[in-house]
Image (cartoon, coloured by chain):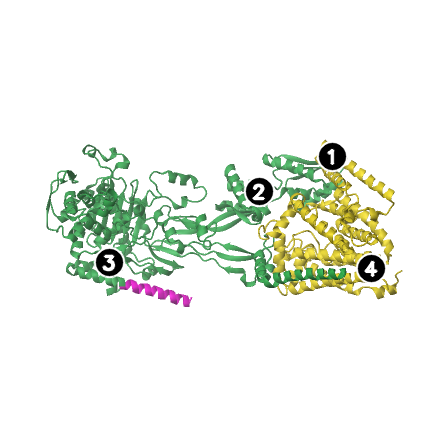
Chain colours: A green, B yellow
Amino acid sequence: MRIQIARWVLLLTFAVLWLRLFTLQLVRGQTYLQRSENNFIQEQWIPHARGRVTDANGEPLVDNRPSYDVYVTFALLPDTSHLLRRLLAPLKWDAPRLRRTMTRIQAAVDARQDVLVPIDTLISPVRCRALQARALAQGVRGWLQQWHGDGSCDITVAALRFPTRERVWRQLQRILGLEDEPMEQLVARANKRANGLGRFKPVLFLADVDFDAYARIQGAVSLGALSGVSVVTAHKRRYLHGDLAAHVLGFVNEVSLDQLRRSPHVYRVGHKVGRGGIERSYEEDLRGQDGIERFVVDARGRRLGEDWQRTLLGRERFVRSATSGLDVQLAIDARLQRAVQQAFTEKAGAAVALDPGTGYVLALASFPSYNPNHVVGRGNTRRLQALRADPLKPWINRAIGSHYPPGSAFKPVTALAGLREGVVTTQRRRWCPGQFRLSRTTWRCVRRHGHGWVDFYEALRASCDVYFYHLGHELGLDPLARMARELSFGKPTGIDLFGESGGNVPTTAYYRKRLGYDAPGFVVNSAIGQGDVTVTTLQLATAYAALVNGGTVYRPRLVRAVSRDGRVVRHYPPSPQSRLDVSAEDSRAVHRGISHVLDKGGSAYGLRWRADLPELVRWLRQSNVRIGGKTGTAQVKRLTLKTGHETVADVPYKHRDHGWFVGFAPADRPEIVVAVLVEHGGWGSVSAAPIACKIIRAWHEGRNAVSVEKPKNSHLRSRDAINRVSTTTKRTKMDSCFRRNDRVGKTTSELSANADSAERHALLLSFLRKQESTVEEEKATGTQSP
Amino acid sequence: MVNVQTLRTRFPYGLAAPCVLLMVIAAINLSSAARSGQPHLHWIHLGRFVAACFVTGSVVFVPPSLLRRLAVVAYVLGIGLLLAVLVVGVTVKGSQRWVHVGFTRLQPSELAKLTTLLVVVGTCASDPTRGGYTLQRLFLPFALSRPLACGGAAVFFVAYKGLLWPFSVWKALAGLGGLLVLTTWGVECGRRLVIRGWRWHEQVALADLVGLPATLVFVQPDLGTTVLLAAPAASVVLFRGVRLRSICLAALLVLVGGFTAWHTLLQDYQKKRVEALLHPTSDLTGSGYHGAQSLIAVGSGRWWGKGLGEGTQTQLAFLPENQTDFVLALWAEEWGFVGTTVVLALFFWLILAMLRISQQARNRFGRLLAFGAGALVFWHVAVNVGMVLGLLPVVGVALPFLSYGGTSLLLHTAAAALCVHVAVWRKV
């Protein structure tokens, strides 16, 4: 009976066990199989190379160079206590005695003295031989045996030569040439990263050591010293021309925790992410994809031999090879950009050069600039701090990110608005007495005794304030604002960069909201680009491009194409945003009005007589390039009559006027628009105009050089025929939309200009559509027959 | 007397067959485990089995009356070895379990399982009590002096450990005090035995017989062996018969005792193991690692297993203790559900055969002996398989015949040999 109970208990127990076995192996077997694979398959990432950035002519601006990163595997560092225990095993010591000896050696190592630590004296001959054999087998350094005549011996250890973790650190420190304190910090950081099972994995010790250190570490590693240390080659971003186009290119930095959390499948710890400029806005194109390689590891994380890899992984070993990022071709011309940065000798400001026919940005610079190579990474901390502490804030991209009152450079906008609304005509003249009164307020003209009788063209050329006070007053705030908004003021232009500011174009609604009322005097200020009107340099260049190209507002573009291995993946054609709602006559009138700024009576006429710029003056007089444009001097602080008479140098820097010059050339059929801002530079005609003219001169010389010599990279030309000067190709009607010479030829026939420009616009759009489709076709055929 | 003829006719082939089959499986299994560790593991295991068969097989020729007397001697010897372990034992992984005996290491706690079982069986068999044991019979003799003795032993033990390093006068005094109490207790025991006559099985509480070695094992510390030392003995006592009222009372006491033990007695690592069982995913790199890796090994075997030598959990050393405690996980990984079912079936067959021998035994001693041997194997299998399959906390319990380990193999071979003894000495 009891046996029977026992049998039942037995049966029940085994049934429970068997059912559990059934559940584990058959019901949940697949899950556990997966988990067992997760145990032994470790994936390693193969770093990718970020895409390169070139200028319009294919000159590389940013590429990658190999970077040597030092890794440390803590589990492979020498373990002194373990080694000592093995060496001293013949002595059959107990644990406390062994520990005491270890403490003594450790103390000597900590004290950084190359002292001899006596381990034991007068050991019997038999044990002496055993000890020697072990020491020889291990091949340890710093192990000294002194033999006595009777075969017994003393053993001492040279603390600093004995293999210890400290010794590895010290050797590494010597090779890397580090001070004590940063070395300790590095060791502590690596220690922190290597907690737990991380001891078996290589952790980053120091990124980007120089080639010399790399070679020395490799040498030491191959000799068997420095066990646990390894060097890995990775890619590091290199900005080839230093601070050239720094604000356009941006820089890369390690990915932030936030970004990692937001897109965990895209980024990994240690990835570099674009932090500004093209690097940021074209991050998705520039970024490649890391490759994945699989390894079989055992429980201690050690990588196993080739036979294991084959049997357990087979073909699945290389899951994915690394894909490098796409190359980005900018519209920037590196030579022009260099010229811009050389021409700008003032303290702070910005310069933008646009192609008015396409909206491509030929050069864009903000000053002061910085070197992107020096803003990240080791050894740059001091430079970075200096950069951050700089009161001029080199970080800021002034060309797009800061907005300033445009001053007189805004007048063409007012003029065009006036023509459109019919407030003025080009014939009607006004009397400029040097001041403008509205109730009890007086506005003064730039010329204190007045211009006398001025007509529309005269007013623009000489920059007569009173003319525009009248004009603005009669025009009203909102029509002016409407015109300005059409010309891309008051909102971001949509350039392919982050951090663009929209500036401000005040309307009556704006003043009502801000002040609660709206006064007739506001528009008087706005008409000459003062008061609450603020613009960015880029906006001004964009607006002028629209003013001189017949009325098309282009969205400024920095990038022409994105390609992989020379094959265009995506093309960025010019993107016309809108057409100005003005008649061609009005448009031409304004164009004509601002074409004579450097001529006699123009506000920048003085430039032709500047004694301190003999080369520029000579060029201006001799070359046949006519430069049009508009000066601007924006008040920062109202200066009283008394202070107004002071020289510029006496005014505090922060209170000086901003100097503007927006130039274009050739004046009647512009191919380049240059906007220059000199922050707190005083008169625009004095500070900004020479810079703009120098830029135009560099552009002109560069263009001549190009048209004389054979085109260097013909494939580029064939790929995007837009805006290329080539007289040899047969001119088709389609070409005529884009080839400047032809178009200019058409615009000279002024009667048909209006119809022509509308037609051109339609043709342009259809051409773009066609081109996009061909690019897509290219892509499609490319994937079919790789 | 046993002669060759009776041996041949009465030999329990139904018992020997599963043993041999299990040993074959063990050899195959260990040959796989040997690939990543020391070679010839399986040959050593088989060699030890043969040696153990010869050593323990001789028990067949010992008459039962002599066996009962020898059991007492072995018990005393076992206690002595357990004490020796505490004094001169080898510490492995934080517990002192092994003692050097000449050429090899011995795990006295494994042997104590057998000797304790034998002595309990002997006591129960010769006890004239009818109608089941009461708690009084199980616990009462020396009940009052027991806490005193335990306290004395504990104080002595702590003080002895303390005497080594670092030395202090207070510890020395405490050790001497503990020794004094123990001596007093021993003298009192001896006095009572002399006065009442040498009928020790009536005088000594069964609980003390089990409790003494169990305590000595528990302080090693080795929770698994403690349980598996007490459980077969308790099974034997239950099989002999305990009154229902006493069982209920004991259960109540165990519940209360268990609750207090959790908060006072259990070592931290034991608690962690129990907690890891309750929340297996909470700490995979720490205390739950053993259990989790074992489950992965078993589960990833699925129907037919990964094949001999292909078990990644073992070969790549993710599964700890894959030659000893978790040997079944290795088998389950490489031979799958089918292979593991075969192993479970063999154990089932073996224990059934033992129970059958118990049923056919000549007298109460034989009946209890065979049952005790069966209980011993049963508890080992149940606890080990439960642990491997994640049903029970991870305690150090070897799987009979399959686990690598000399003492464990000797223990279970001896259990089988005792059953053979009972079968051979049964009434015709």
User: Is residue B181 on the magenta stretch?
Assistant: no
Sequence-first tag of 4 and 1 = 1
Quarter of the rendering containing residue A20: bottom right
Depth-wise, is mark 3 or mark 4 nearer the camera?
4
The secondary structure that most of the magenta stretch takes on is: helix
Sequence order check: which comes first, mark 3 or mark 2? 2
Residue for badge 1? B174
Kind of residue at badge 4: Val
Label 3: chain letter: A
Q: Secondary structure at mark 4?
A: helix
The local crowd at label 3, few if under 14, some if 14 to 19, many if 20 or more residues have their Cα within 10 Å, is many
Q: Residue furthest right?
A: B1
State the residue position of label 3. A740
- Alpha carbon separation for disc pair 2 and 1: 50 Å
Residue A374 against residue B377 in the figure, above or below: above
User: Looking at the image, can residue B231 be seen?
Assistant: no
- Chain under numbered label 2: A
What's the amino acid at mark 1?
Ala
- Badge 2 amino acid: Val
Residue type at the position of mark 3: Arg
Residue under numbered circle 4: B422
Give the magenta part as a residue range: A766-786
Vertical position of residue A779 compared to residue B174: above or below = below
Residue A119: x and y, percent?
A: 68, 37
Q: Residues within 10 Å of mark 1 (few under 14, many from 20)?
A: some
Label 2 sits on residue: A168
A36 to the left or right of A66: right
